[in-house]
Image (cartoon, rainbow, N blue to C red):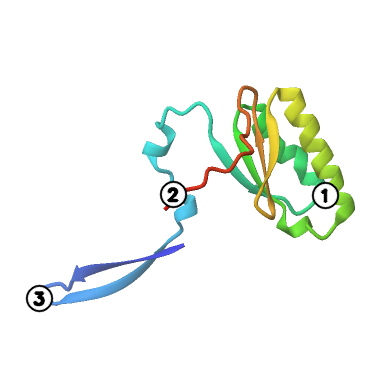
Amino acid sequence: MAILRKREFGKGDMSPVETTEFIDLTQMNFEAENQIGAKTLVKVAEIYRYEDLSKLTAHVFNGHLLVLDYTALSGDQLAMKRITNDLKLIARDVGGDVAGLGKNYFIVTPGGVKVDRNKIKGGF
């Protein structure tokens, strides 16, 4: 949510009257976003229950990359084992890849996209 302030002029005089209007940016539709022309998108998701996994991984089956934040489940070893196994099977089914990113993230890729596990280090 963002706050937008605009100035309006009072009737009959030129003194500005300040009003505050709230706009919910999540509800706005930007036409330029829909005309990007990209066939593959990077989707970012959070998972709170194991049962949500099938809904989230549908994006991978549709050809998009999925960055999955599993912070909420990181303490549940059973759920993490099930999620990891399912992500490996999904990546195998679509011909993609799955890898851990940092401490609490997985990346799952569609067919034709592999994750390079070698870090690129800048030198100075």
Nearest the viewer among 10 and 116 is 116
Quarter-of-image position of residue 95: top right
Q: Earlier in the sequence, mark 3 or mark 2?
A: 3
Q: Which residue is mark 3?
A: 13
Q: Earlier in the sequence, mark 2 or mark 1?
A: 2
Nearest the viewer among 90 and 104 is 104
Q: Hey, what amino acid is under mark 3? A: Asp
Residue at the spot x=85%, y=57% of the render? 76
Quarter-of-image position of residue 67: top right
SS category of the residue bearing label 1: helix
Q: Which residue is mark 2?
A: 28
Q: Hey, what amino acid is under mark 2? A: Met
Residue at the spot x=80%, y=30% of the render? 89
Q: Which residue is mark 1?
A: 80
The Cα atoms of the two marked residues, 3 and 2, are separated by: 34 Å
Q: Label 2: how many residues lie within 10 Å, few (<14), some (14-19) or many (20+)? A: few
Q: Are marks 3 and 1 in contact (CB under 8 Å)?
A: no
Q: Hey, what amino acid is under mark 1? A: Met
Residue at the spot x=73%, y=30% of the render? 91
**Spot occupied by residue 115 in the image (x, y as percentages of width and height):** 63, 34
